[in-house]
Image: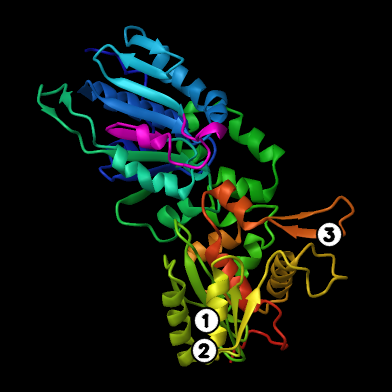
Amino acid sequence: MDVDLRDYIPNPKQQLAHDSPSKFILYGGATGGGKSYFLCMDALRRSLAWNGNSVGIYRWELASFKSTTFATMEETILSREGLIANHNQNDRKITLCNGSIIRYGGLKPSDSAAGDIKKVVKSLEHSDIYLDEVTDFPEQVFDFMPTRIGRIKCQWALTGEWEKPIGHIRCTCNPELSWVKTRWIDKPWPGYVFIQSTIRDNEKNLSSDYRETLLASNDADWVRRYVNGDWSAAIDYSAVCPTALILHAIGLEGVPRGVVEFGVDVAGEGDDMSVIYMREGGHAKLLWEGKEPNTMRLKAKVEAFADMYHPRLIKVDGIGIGTGVVDALGEDGYPVEAIIGGARPHDESGGFLNQRAEIYWNFRKMLQEGKVCLPNHPETVNELGQVRYMQTASGRVIQIEAKPAIKKRLGKSPDRADALIYCFAYAEEEFTVATA
């Protein structure tokens, strides 16, 4: 099959991404870098290189795909003469003249399929998957995707041999606080490669005033993040703990000194994590994290650390399964206190909806006052920076996003962030970060 692709001259960064053998590619990281164009053209090239292949181009939300990625797909794939054998728009399936299939759309289950967030992904059968704005995808959905690639036996057009091509997952996004930042940017996992492309790398494909228009109409933080591709500028403006405060707390140095207290978040079955955090004065330290639904085994871990560090107080998520950990620690004589997020705040005149709002907001104040030294732990940092707050129209009542709402929005629970917050909750002593 001879399809003319000479009109596509990839920029050097796009070519680098096309040629990369890495299993997990993240391309872009800024606006105007040619992200969606790269995805569509890589999918097309891969489909033409193998007769009878199957690839998928997706976003999380179908509506977002229709309003963004589909327009690029029309330009790069659907408009080519002699390429398309059939386009079934109802099934969102494009069949090429060499028998290869490109599926597209959104992978988020419909409301009627609520309860299994991976329901749509489980049905995929591809050699390669392409994800536009991968930060929109819940982490647990992405983690399942490697089981859906490398599954198609097809014919290599160059030699006529039949085999299953090695599968890849190629993604794009702008800088965001998320699990994506942890895997590709902060401490890249094996097989994960980030190839940055900004306006400067893709200028030949943009209008002459594209950059000037962006710079003229947006503030400095926006430019750092979306034009320069600076991941440290990733900010959720509704976050209770702003990125700048978190990064400042990570940059503080000193000697841990002061009262020791623990914060424990208890997970049940599923993907949630049980986490044990400690603070010594204003210095926070992650002691342990893992999937431990057995309350007695988790209790034993907490007690082992308590015997080592002798905390004044162990503050445990006292809702649901956490009740068993609280009771067991108390029966064994350890100083334990239940944190009940939905309970009435200690300071009922402080303008907080509940205890969860009170302890998060007080932690924010500690960050502002430079009282907290945080570990450089990307998973905790990203979770902490994504917990949002709301205020009533009068500004008098502060509410923190509930864990179920966060899990629905992000696909995971902020277990590390909550454990960290608990160990600073209702600190009775005055303390600062010791620097000598």
Task: Point out residue 242 in the picture as x, y percentages from the top left corner.
Answer: 66, 61
Mark 3 belongs to which amino acid? Answer: Val
Seen in the picture, residue 277 relative to 239 is either above or below; the reply is below
Left or right: where 292 falls relative to 54: right
> Is residue 317 rendered magenta in the image?
no
Residue 250 in sight in this render? no
Residue at the (45%, 14%) spot, across then down: 89
Is there a contact, CB below 8 Å, between mark 2 and mark 1? yes
* Chain part drawn in magenta: 106-130
Mark 2 belongs to which amino acid? Answer: Asp
Residue at the (37%, 29%) spot, across then down: 56
Left or right: where 41 falls relative to 424: left
Quadrant in which the C terminus is drawn: bottom right
Q: Quadrant of residue 91?
A: top left
Residue for badge 2: 332
- Calculate the distance from the C-alpha at mark 3 to the C-alpha at mark 1: 35 Å
Q: What predominant SS class does the magenta segment belong to?
A: loop
Looking at this view, is 263 or 337 the one in front? 337
Q: Quadrant of residue 371?
A: bottom right
Q: Earlier in the sequence, mark 3 or mark 1?
A: 1
Residue for badge 1: 328
Mark 1 belongs to which amino acid? Answer: Ala
Seen in the picture, residue 259 relative to 40 is either above or below; the reply is below
Looking at this view, is 99 or 274 the one in front? 274
Q: Which numbered dot is residue 397? A: 3
Residue at the (67%, 49%) spot, across then down: 220
Residue at the (47%, 91%) spot, across then down: 307
> Is residue 127 rendered magenta in the image?
yes
Task: Point out residue 191 in the picture as x, y percentages from the top left corner.
Answer: 30, 51
Q: Earlier in the sequence, mark 2 or mark 3?
A: 2
